[in-house]
Amino acid sequence: MSIKTMTRTGWVLTGLYALFMIGASVTPKLLQMPVAEETMAQLGWPAGYALPIGVIELALLILYLIPRTSVLGAIMTMALLGGAMATQIRAENPLFSHILFSVYLGLFMWGGLWLRNPRLRALFPFDRTAAAAD
């Protein structure tokens, strides 16, 4: 795959990740939709935590989308996703559909960043020839 194709694919994956986060997580929390508070309550969170978590998610998404801060945003998002995973474990939800969803989302996020960031590809190459090609 050419570098240009990898970069474009990375931005497409990044865009899909961003749209998912905005649509499925950030917007319901920021608009204080009942579904956000109900979901948080089912997971054992006290009332009122959905909005601050939504603000944090939006801030981390913005950091992730800005090329200069994308790695910082990805690292901090993984911390957030780790907390989400811990919440799912504590709530004794199913493993593959709920608990590991944070892992799936994190892999998708990092995959997009890896494809669009040549420095990250050089730091974590799949093989030695991939590092030399960039």
Image: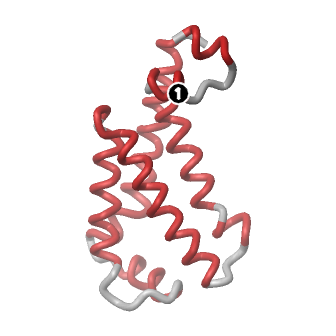
Residue 45 drawn above or below residue 99: below
Q: Which image quadrant: the N terminus?
A: top right
Camera-side residue of 110 and 33:
110
Q: Across the whole image, how many numbered discs are drawn on residues?
A: 1
Badge 1 density bin: few <14, some 14–19, many ≥20, Cα 10 Å: few
x, y (%) of residue 34?
36, 82
Residue 16 drawn above or below residue 99: above
Residue 15 sits in which quadrant?
Answer: top left
Q: Which residue is mark 1?
A: 123
Which residue is drawn at the image coordinates 45% and 24% (left, top)?
Answer: 119
Query: Quick check: 33 left or right of 17?
Result: left
User: Three-letter amino acid code at disc 1?
Assistant: Leu
Query: Quick check: 66 left or right of 125?
Result: left
Which residue is drawn at the image coordinates 58% and 29% (left, top)?
Answer: 124
x, y (%) of residue 62?
28, 47
SS class of the residue under badge 1? helix
Residue 108 drawn above or below residue 92: above
x, y (%) of residue 41?
46, 88
Q: How is the image coloured?
A: secondary structure
Camera-side residue of 127 and 56:
127
Which residue is drawn at the image coordinates 52% and 41% (left, top)?
Answer: 110
x, y (%) of residue 114?
51, 31
Residue 52 drawn above or below residue 129: below
